[in-house]
Image (spheres, rainbow, N blue to C red):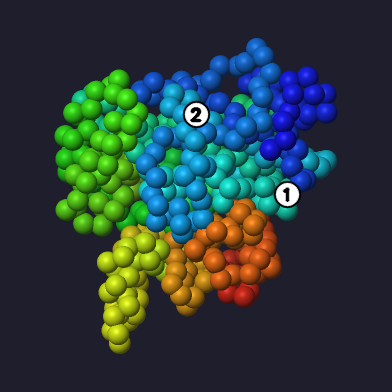
Amino acid sequence: MPATEPNDQDAPRFNTPAGDVIGWRDRGVIRATGIRYARTQRFCAPIDEPPSTTPIQATEWSPASPQNTIPELNEALGVTEQEFHSVEGELHLSVIVPDSPATAPRPVMVWIHGGSYVFGAGDLSVFDVRPLALEQHVIVVAVNYRLGLLGFLGGYANRPANLGLLDLISALRWVNTNIAAMGGDPNNVTLFGHSAGGDAAAHLMIADGTEGLFQRAIIQSAPLGISRGRAKMNTRMGEVAATLKDDAPLEEVLRVQSQVAEAASGFGLKSAMPFGTQYGHYPLPAESDIDAAWRCVAPKYDVFIGTTAEETALFVVMSPKLMRIRQLPFVGEQASRAMVAATTNKVYKRDALTFARRHASAKGNAYVYRLDWGKGRYPFGAAHTIELPLLLAEPANWQYADLVKDVDDATLLEHGQRLRALWADFARDGQLPPTGQLEPKIVEWWQAS
C-alpha cells in the first residue's frame, strides 16, 4: 500500500459529511480504507462516529474484529494469521470507487463477510472487492463488525444480543449519509453477504432501523436451516458466558468464547454455528413473528438467494474424522456424497427455496440460484465458499488456497468476470432474465414464484 501524506495534493479526496476523506489509488480504483464508522464499549450498542474536524486518513486496511483463528479454514482459503490484526472498541469499513468518470451516481454494493459469526474481515486479501468495482463500475463497501461472544450472544447477565447486527446497521447509516459524496447512489444499495454474512443480510431486512438503508439483498449460502430453535442452546451458552467480567482482558474473552462454543454441543447441526442472530431481542422480532415480518417487507426488497451444489463438502474436508470415513474403500465416497447432499439440503438449500417462495408470494421480487462451479473436483467440489475465488479478489490472491489449488489463473479470471457481471447486473436494478445459466455451468438461476 502506498503511503499517503496528509498534505499530498495528488491524493484522492472526498468531502463527505463524515469529514474530508483522503484515500489512495490502486490500479484503476480509488480505495478509502480503514474508515472508522462507529466506536464501541464491550457488550454495548455501537455509537456512530461523529463527523471529523480533521482529515480522515483512509490509507490503511481495516483492522479485524477480535477473533480466534481457525487453522483449517485459513488453509482452505489461503490466508495467514498475520492478516487478522485486530482492535477492540472501534469499527471500520473500506470503500472502493472506480477511478473513472461517471455520468450518474453509481450503484453501491455492501459486502458482509461470512465466517459463522466468529471469523473473517472485510479487507482480507481473498475478499478483495477491487475487480468487482473496477469491471462493473459500481462502488463496493466492505464492512467489519463484532463477532462471537462480543457480537452475537446476549440475553444473559443484562448483556444485549445482536450487537454485531447493530454494528452493520450503523455501517449502513454511514453509507446512507456519506456515499453520495463519493459518487454513489444512496437509493441504490445492495447487500451481498456470504454464509453468516448472507444470514445477516436476510435478517437486516426485518431489523428495526434499516428502513430505506438498502433496496436489494444477495444472500449467498446462508445457513437459514439452523437459524431457528436456538433459545435453549443460547441459554446454556449464556450460563458459561456470564462468568466473564465486563472488563476481562481480551485474551480471556476469546478463551471463554471457546468454552461457550463447547457448551453448545449436543444441539445437533445448530451447534456447528453456535453464535448468531437471536430472535426476540432488539432489533429482531420474536421467532413466532419472523415469517410475518419477512412477508411484510417483501415488496420493499429485491432478493437473489442461493447455494452451492455441495455446500457441506467444505466441512467434510476440514474434518479429519469425516475425511477418514470418506476414504474408506468402496463405500466411503458414496456415503460422503449422501451426507453432503442431505446436510446441504437441511442447512442451506431447503430454507433458501422457502425464503424465495415466501418473498415472491408476498409480492416481492426474488430469484434463486444454484452454483455448480467445481462440482466433481476432488476434494472440495462445489463446496461452501467456492464462489468467493470467482466473485472476490484476483487469482494471485488465491494462490495459497487449498480450495482452488488445481485451478489455473486464466479459468479463475474468466469465470470470475462472468459471475461478477451477474451479481452487478442484479445490483443495478434488481432484474435478471426469468431463467438463465452462465456457461460453462457456473451458476443457474430462476425467478421464484
Residue drawn at 50 percent across, 42 percent down:
82
User: Where is mark 1, residue-wise?
Assistant: 134
430 vs 122, nearest the viewer: 122
304 left or right, relative to 105: left
- Quadrant placement of the N terminus: top right
Q: Which mark is residue 16?
A: none
- Binning the other alpha carbons within 10 Å of mark 1 as few (below 14), some (14 to 19) or many (20 upward) gives many
Secondary structure of residue under mark 1: helix
As displayed, is residue 427 above or below residue 441? above
| Callout 2 amino acid | Leu
As displayed, is residue 384 above or below residue 12? below
Residue drawn at 32 percent across, 70 percent down:
323
In whole angstroms, how far apart are the C-alphas of marks 2 and 1?
26 Å
The numbered mark, 2 or 1, whose residue comes first in the sequence reads: 2
Q: Mark 2 and 1 residues: CB-CB less than 8 Å, in contact?
A: no
398 left or right, relative to 273: right
Q: Say whether residue 424 is visible.
A: no
User: Where is mark 2, residue-wise?
Assistant: 91
Q: In the displayed image of the protein, which residue is found farthest to the top?
A: 53
As displayed, is residue 315 above or below residue 118? below
Secondary structure of residue under mark 2: strand
Residue 166 horizontal/vertical position (percent): 42, 31
- Binning the other alpha carbons within 10 Å of mark 2 as few (below 14), some (14 to 19) or many (20 upward) gives many
Residue 117 horizontal/vertical position (percent): 38, 44
Residue 335 horizontal/vertical position (percent): 29, 78
74 vs 137, nearest the viewer: 74
| Callout 1 amino acid | Leu
Residue 384 horizontal/vertical position (percent): 44, 61
Residue drawn at 49 percent across, 63 percent down:
402
Q: Say whether residue 70 is visible.
A: yes
Residue drawn at 30 percent across, 87 percent down:
330
57 left or right, relative to 361: right
